[in-house]
Amino acid sequence: MAKGKKGPKGKKITLKIAKNSIKVTIDGKRRLDLSKMGIATFPKCILRMQDIDELDLSRNMIKKIPDTIQKFQNLRWLDLHSNLIDKLPESIGQLQNLLYLNVANNKLTNKGLPQEISTLKNLRMLNLGLNNIESVPTTYGALKELKEVGLFDNYLTSVPVSIQNLPKLKKLNTKRNPFPQPAEDEVLDSIKRLEALYLVNEKELCEPCLTKCQQQRDKMNDIIREPAACKRKPLFTNLITPNSTARENQADWR
């Protein structure tokens, strides 16, 4: 950006525009939908609509979420995916009714993830995919109601055991992270153990057992052929409308 020039101003949202953007969900909740409106700054006028149940600011150009987000005490659903956010405010931990939090496809790093998220005791879904996160706070294991966690397309080399063992967890998406590959000696040991399964004549095995052994051998061959994971990988930064590659994974980052 040239010296003296400011970033995009974005569309100005007035209270009238915000009120006209209110939708009622099937279960009677009030959703303020300001997605895909070219907004660059969090609209202050919506602070006068603190009684809404759902807030959608996805697919804009917002860089910062203010501490005043805490005023939306009725919020159960907050969608901020596909913006330019690099840090979430600590006050987000005061949204105790929040069930759904989507901040995928932003610019979040480790420093941008507040520990206070671990106080959202009612949270059911947390999406942190498509960011620049290298590690996730182990304290997020306190979110006992979580059913879905998205950690895909980050820079993770491990996932805290406290998150893996969440009691109600049904889906943990960690695709396309640079997890370390098995050491060569570990692969060789696995091959030796696998070979031991074939020290009998095939005719002495029942058909299900033979099929299982063949599947295990195929799986091991795939591990041997699989290239080491790259430390860096393409990210769909600043994504508002998905390109052809990201379109295949829209269900993940939405």
Image: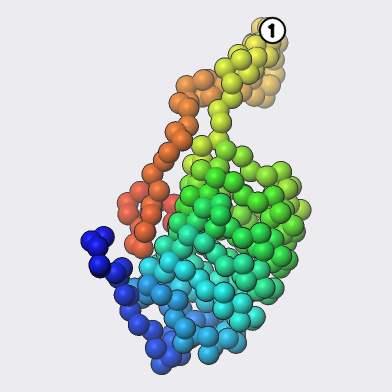
Question: In the picture shown, does residue 170 fall above or below 228?
Answer: below
Residue 33 location in percent, x, y?
A: 46, 79
Left/right of residue 77 with respect to residue 120 in the rendered view: left
Specify the quadrant of the image occupied by residue 227.
top left
Q: Quadrant of the N terminus?
A: bottom left
Numbered-mark total: 1
Residue 142 location in percent, x, y?
A: 74, 57
Residue 66 location in percent, x, y?
A: 52, 74
Q: Which residue is at the front of the view, 180 or 190?
A: 180
Residue at 55%, 64% in the rendered image: 88
Left/right of residue 186 with respect to residue 248 in the rendered view: right
Residue at 46%, 73% in the rendered image: 57
Question: In the picture shown, does residue 144 fall above or below 225?
Answer: below
Left/right of residue 7 with respect to residue 171 in the rendered view: left
Residue at 69%, 7% in the rendered image: 200
Question: In the picture shown, does residue 250 fall above or below 189?
Answer: below
Query: Extreme bottom residue here?
Result: 16
Residue 193 location in percent, x, y?
A: 68, 14
Residue at 58%, 86% in the rendered image: 50
Q: Amino acid at mark 1?
A: Val
Query: Extreme left residue here?
Result: 2
Give the labeled residue for mark 1.
200
Dot 1 lies on which element? loop
Residue 37, visible in the rendered structure: yes
Residue 23, visible in the rendered structure: no
Query: Extreme front residue here?
Result: 4
Crowdedness near tag 1: few (<14), some (14–19) or many (≥20) residues, C-alpha within 10 Å: few
